[in-house]
Image (cartoon, rainbow, N blue to C red):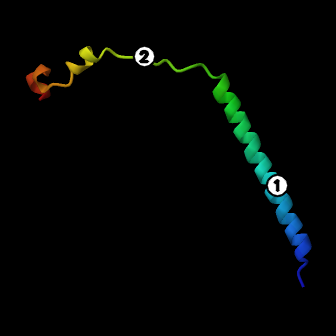
């Protein structure tokens, strides 16, 4: 007959190790995110970009 207590304990220890590995990975990536340089985000002038939307402004070969 299988030793269910031993099976349960082995499974519990393995799951505990797996959770610890995932938590360490999460903490490491959170530190990487926090310590990274901020992204270079700029607000574009909407009047300049709006001109590019209309087909009338495109050359004939681009239509």
In the rendered image, the vertical position of residue 54 relative to residue 27, given as above or below? above
- Asked which secondary structure carries label 2, the reply is loop
How far across and down, in percent of the image, does residue 17 sit?
A: 82, 52
User: The C terminus appears in which quarter of the rendering?
Assistant: top left
How busy is the neighbourhood of tag 2: few (under 14 within 10 Å), some, or many (20 plus)? few
Q: Is residue 25 left or right of residue 49?
A: right
Residue at 86% over, 71% down: 7
In the rendered image, the vertical position of residue 22 relative to residue 34, given as above or below? below
Give the residue at mark 2. Answer: 42
User: The N terminus appears in which quarter of the rendering?
Assistant: bottom right
- Asked which secondary structure carries label 1, the reply is helix
Residue at 15% over, 25% down: 54
Q: Earlier in the sequence, mark 2 or mark 1?
A: 1
What is the CA distance from the residue labelled 2 to the residue labelled 1?
45 Å
In the rendered image, the vertical position of residue 62 relative to residue 25, given as above or below? above
Q: Quadrant of residue 10?
A: bottom right
How busy is the neighbourhood of tag 1: few (under 14 within 10 Å), some, or many (20 plus)? few
Residue at 46% over, 19% down: 41
Give the residue at mark 1. Answer: 16
């Amino acid at each position: 007959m299988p030793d269910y207590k031993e099976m349960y304990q082995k499974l519990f220890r393995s799951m505990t190790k797996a959770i610890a590995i995932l938590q360490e990975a999460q903490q490491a990536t959170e530190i990487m995110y926090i310590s990274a340089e901020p992204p270079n985000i700029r607000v574009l002038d909407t009047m300049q970009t709006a001109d590019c939307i209309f087909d009338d402004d495109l050359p004939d070969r681009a239509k």
